[in-house]
Image (tube, rainbow, N blue to C red):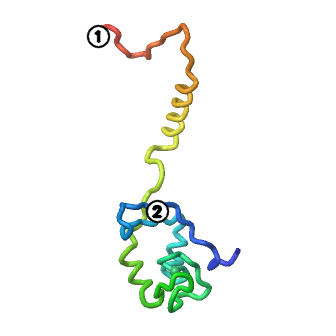
């Protein structure tokens, strides 16, 4: 599996809008995009090819040689961030807080955070 062309394309996510003709495939590795550009991967089914730009994809019969470049140009939407939109520190503190709440057992003590005005 050390040969680059054999490496399977890793699809991180597929975002569907509800219309099957309007799905967005999110690739995990930018090298996979490069392999599609270089004709080593079918842009339709992501089958890797040993020899770039075959006339048709042996798996899905997509006309790779005739269509691949224009297909990619038409459909490539650029790089997007996938995952959490908060920082790792905020995420960890949120998880700790969630864990504390989950494990909270009511007791005799009641505390109020500093700065909270009780006179209102
Ligand atoms: Zn294909």
Examine the rendered structure and indicate whether residue 73 appears above or below residue 24: below
Image-quadrant location for residue 4? bottom right
Q: Please provide percent x and percent y for residue 47.
A: 56, 78
Examine the rendered structure and indicate whether residue 81 appears above or below residue 60: above
- Is 4 left, or right, of 26 in this rendering? right
* Residue under the image location 45 percent in, 44 percent down: 86
* Residue under the image location 38 percent in, 78 percent down: 73
Residue tagged 2 = 14
How far is the residue under mark 2 from the one under mark 1?
51 Å
2 or 1: mark nearer the eye:
2
Closer to the camera in the image, 117 or 71: 71
* Residue under the image location 50 percent in, 34 percent down: 94
Residue tagged 1 = 120
Q: State which tag comes first along the sequence, 2 or 1.
A: 2
Circle 2 Cα neighbour tier, 10 Å, few/some/many (<14 / 14–19 / ≥20): few
* Residue under the image location 56 percent in, 82 percent down: 59
């Amino acid at each position: 599996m050390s040969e680059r062309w054999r490496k399977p394309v890793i699809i991180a996510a597929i975002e569907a809008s509800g219309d099957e003709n309007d799905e967005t495939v999110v690739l995990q590795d930018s090298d996979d995009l490069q392999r599609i550009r270089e004709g080593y991967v079918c842009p339709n089914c992501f089958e890797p090819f040993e020899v770039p730009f075959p006339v048709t994809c042996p798996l899905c019969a997509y006309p790779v040689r005739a269509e691949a470049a224009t297909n990619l140009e038409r459909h490539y939407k650029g790089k997007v961030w996938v995952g959490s939109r908060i920082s790792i520190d905020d995420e960890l503190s949120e998880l700790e807080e969630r864990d504390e709440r989950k494990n909270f057992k009511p007791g005799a003590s009641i505390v109020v955070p500093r700065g909270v005005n009780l006179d209102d």
